[in-house]
Image: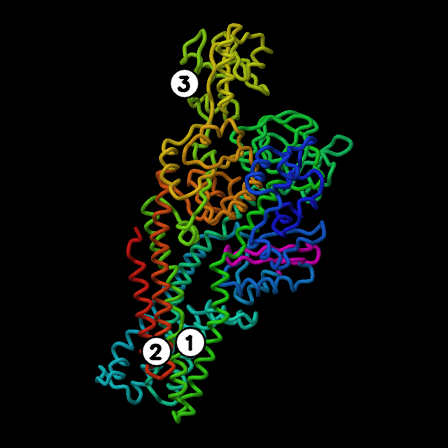
Amino acid sequence: MSNDSRALRGESTDERSDGACSLCDLPTPDDPVTGDDVPGAYCCRGCLEVSRALGGPDAVGEADVERELAPDDGEDAPADAERTFLSVDGMHCATCETFIESTAAGDDGVYGAEASYATDMLRVTYDPDRTDLDGLVGRLGRYGYDAADPDAATDGEEESGLATFLIGGGVFGMMVMVWYVLFLYPTYLGFEPIVGLDGFDGLYLVANVWVMSSIVLFYTGYPILRGAYVSLVARQPNMDLLVALAAVAAYVFSVGSMLVGRTHVYFDVSVAIVLVVTLGNYYEDRIKRRAASRLTDLTSARVTDATRVTDDGRTESVAVDSLAPGDRVLVRPGERVPVDGVVVDGRAAVDESLVTGESLPTTRGPGDPVVGGSVVTDDSLTVEVGADATSTLDRLVELLWEIQSSRGGAQRLADKLATVFVPLVLVLAAVTTAGFLALGSSPADALLNGLTVLVVSCPCALGLATPLAVASGVRDAADAGVVVASDAVFEDAPDADVLVFDKTGTLTDGRMHVRGVTTGEADEATAVELAAAVERHAAHPVAKAVVERAPDRLPEVTDSSIHRRGAAGTVDGRRVVVGHPDLLREEGLSVPATLAAAGESVRDDGRVPVFVGWDRTARAVLDVGDAPRATWDETLSELGTGREIVVLTGDDERAAAQFRSHPAVDEVFAGVPPEAKAQTVERLRSRGTVAMVGDGSNDAPALAAADVGIAFGSGTDLAGSAADAVVVERGLEAVPTVFAVAAGTHRRIRENLAWAFVYNLVAIPLAAFGLLNPLLAAVAMGTSSLLVVLNSSRSVE
């Protein structure tokens, strides 16, 4: 059980296993970081400071109870169990979650299944020898749910959904309404139609309407009917059930009327209900498909195979799941470390940015820990598998799933309303029918009044109130250069009490470049040109920054060599050494005191000093580092009004010093690993609604943990997909626009919901007392929906 899970379940940190950080569950060093005023032991100073600021490691929130009541997710499965994620198309509500989980768990080889309506994903923990995943996919398919590998999802599915609506619904629905406008409505209103409805002509006309209405109901409306069926099987009434009952009741009543020779039919009611609800569902599906890809990029970086070193020194390719504590694995340059462990042989620069967020690769040698998911850049390492034989990257995937699949307060409220509203309407319709029968009405008239109650209470306006307002907000946000991926932006951003900024790539531009040059016995242009000539074949980000600063054409280099602390080579007959001052000294070059002091000053500011020397002495120091974005000062000042501003970074304290001094910044947490970032955001939620702005894959769990996550389009795909909004234009200065648009959309949602509830309060009693017929009920329903559409179409700014 992870430390996060223990905290969320309310268990004391005293129960945690020895050697694990009390905040993030990462291994602690032999001499763990502790504080006299804070209980527990920590892996780094960042975790200690976070714990101190947030009330200690035992602080928990309201999520504890929900985690305890969560379905069996397979956490108690045997060690050899496998876990996979499936994308499931067709989930429409929490009822679908329950049904899919029970269907999957019905397999003897499945230890646990957890479905997420929010992301259209299913996580299955199973025995690969006893469970056939293809068979599970087939069983779900029999109920209309299309399950597949998340990577297999394509944009074609979305286009297919649009085609289904346009062909099955739009075309045939329009044809139905043309028949009604030209022939049926005039008759209902006492006018003479274009042609008579008696005899064969009338039968032919109604039969055509029946056929086309059947296509709309059973083809376009199939997802609604399926949702209704699932709700009955799961014994959890939902809105799909009420919509289906209204549409089917109008259809059955009309078929019955047609069979007895009546031309007063209500196929138009059935068509209108299906088309309006399908339109709303289509928009909702578009948002959910974006959410379904949130885990894809991170899971694609997970390592499935490893090169194990045998006792006799040979190597063999094995599955990562078969690795055991104490095994040794060979990691070549460009490969990812498969699991957490300790280096036993070799020395190389390791890029941990995907996992930790550190902007610079870190040199790892014998005895140094490495995290699973990091990339070895310039040399091979032999790593001994750690005690739990797991990967930090894998833990990030699981953490991201846990956060994203949890159900928010608004969704829980909607679920509860559905379970009450649907039975209430059904009972009211039955009582209305029985009441009119008792008062002497004919069975046909009594059934018609009961049908009217179902039609008028069909929650079209209520169902469209939020998605259409959100659509308008999405449009206005797009005009401002912001892509909205979740309606959580509009629900929670206006009420944000705490705004958390990641540093690297968010407040800074996220890449290394030469910020300045201090020269001794050389000019700046010559120092940069020679340094770039030597560094151009190195893969290190610092080397790339040096090359970018130099001219396009560089002199040729001979006898070049890449070292652990830099590079060297011969340029125009001169031996040039670039890198750490120790490397220059090893190569026989002296380092003048003035340049050494300049290098220390650069290092104290949290950047990297790169020394350049030739002719037996150091000639210059390049200041290489990450620079703040141009508008960071103004953005923090604008957003800091009425909100608490927190800066969160995996870099050390020196790199975060300039942000700590900003008057709008309330707190800075430095040296925080990614799992602790998510935990930090979770605990900051005790102070109110939390919004986070981040950039980078390591920020994905923290972005998802926040009530609102905002990422930059220039960052990794995972950060963008884990966020609720992605800034693709104007950079940091567009972040205030996100909050402005969110506030306007939130106001529009409240207006729409208020109208929808007022409509139901007025229309349902009128229908129950027989003051409406199904046609007027359908008109009232359509009018209500139209008002919602018109209100939503206005600009929210």
Question: Measured from the top left, where is residue 266 in percent x and y?
Answer: 35, 80
Determine if residue 451 is in view.
yes
Which residue position is annotated with label 1?
A: 246
Residue type highlighted by circle 3? Arg
Which stretch did the figure color magenta? 111-135
Q: Is residue 277 above or below residue 367?
A: below
Q: Is residue 130 above or below residue 733?
A: below
Question: Measured from the top left, where is residue 339 in percent x and y?
Answer: 65, 38
Q: Is residue 87 left or right of residue 165?
A: right
Which residue position is annotated with label 2?
A: 209
Determine if residue 339 is in view.
no
Q: Is residue 85 left or right of residue 244?
A: right
The image quarter in which residue 521 lies: top left
Is residue 743 magenta-colored?
no
Which residue sits at x=58%, y=60%? 137
Classify mark 1: helix, strand or loop. Answer: helix
Q: Is residue 270 left or right of residue 69?
A: left
